[in-house]
Image (cartoon, helix red, strand yellow):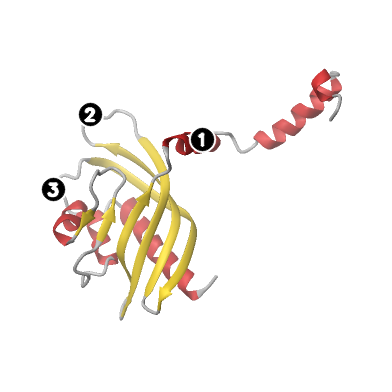
């Protein structure tokens, strides 16, 4: 693992800590507050958020409307674009329960593309964009995610059972 990968991974671990401890207001500390036009593209909003006047309230809203929110990430890929700019591509998942009206929690997953700027105190985020899958791809991925982990072993046993009972579909195989 490269130093850059380790450094960006550490920021994502802090992001995970902020979300999962419900301390969303600490997310701003991970951003480059000197950047005049930070960008946040949230999948739940129609319009991208550009600038502090809209991003700050997103993380410090009065009564956020969430009872609980859990977040995680995986598959981190990092690429240095310039000495002080890095790109991160990763998968993320979330689980949430709304504070009002929703009785069941819900979850989702998608990809994220983020940009970071190197500052004197480390890498800081300047852009975060969720990149949802298209509807067909998302449904297919969801169907794959709900398959139980032991299915491949079960499928191998099933194939042997079918041969043992002389299933005509297995004669050539």
Mark 3 crowdedness (10 Å alpha carbons): few <14, some 14-19, many ≥20: few
- Horizontal arrangement in the rendering, residue 62 relative to residue 162 (left or right): left
**Could you tell me if the residues under marks 2 and 3 are in contact, i.e. CB atoms within 8 Å?**
no
Q: Is residue 29 above or below residue 171?
A: below
Of residues 88 and 94, which is closer to you in this image? 88
Sequence-wise first label, 3 or 1: 3
x, y percentage for residue 168? Answer: 83, 18
Q: How far separated are the C-alphas under marks 3 and 1?
A: 37 Å
Quadrant containing the C terminus in the rendered view: top right
Quadrant containing the N terminus in the rendered view: bottom right
The residue at which mark 2 appears reads as 101
Which element type, helix, strand or loop, lies under badge 3? loop
Mark 2 crowdedness (10 Å alpha carbons): few <14, some 14-19, many ≥20: few
Mark 1 crowdedness (10 Å alpha carbons): few <14, some 14-19, many ≥20: few
The residue at which mark 3 appears reads as 62
The residue at which mark 1 appears reads as 140
Q: How far separated are the C-alphas under marks 1 and 2?
A: 29 Å
Identify the image quadrant of residue 129.
Answer: bottom left
């Amino acid at each position: 693992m490269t130093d850059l990968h380790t450094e960006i991974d550490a920021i994502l671990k802090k992001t995970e800590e902020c979300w999962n401890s419900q301390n969303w207001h600490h997310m701003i500390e991970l951003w480059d507050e000197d950047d005049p036009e930070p960008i946040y593209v949230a999948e739940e909003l129609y319009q991208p958020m550009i600038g502090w006047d809209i991003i700050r309230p997103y993380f410090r809203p009065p009564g956020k409307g969430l009872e609980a929110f859990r977040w995680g990430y995986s598959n981190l890929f990092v690429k240095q674009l310039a000495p002080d700019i890095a790109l991160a591509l990763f998968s993320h998942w979330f689980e949430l329960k709304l504070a009002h009206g929703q009785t069941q929690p819900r979850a989702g997953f998608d990809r994220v593309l983020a940009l970071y700027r190197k500052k004197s105190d480390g890498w800081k985020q300047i852009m975060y964009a969720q990149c949802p899958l298209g509807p067909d791809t998302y449904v297919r991925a969801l169907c794959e995610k709900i398959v139980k982990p032991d299915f491949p072993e079960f499928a191998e046993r099933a194939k042997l059972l079918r041969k043992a009972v002389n299933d005509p579909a297995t004669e050539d195989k």
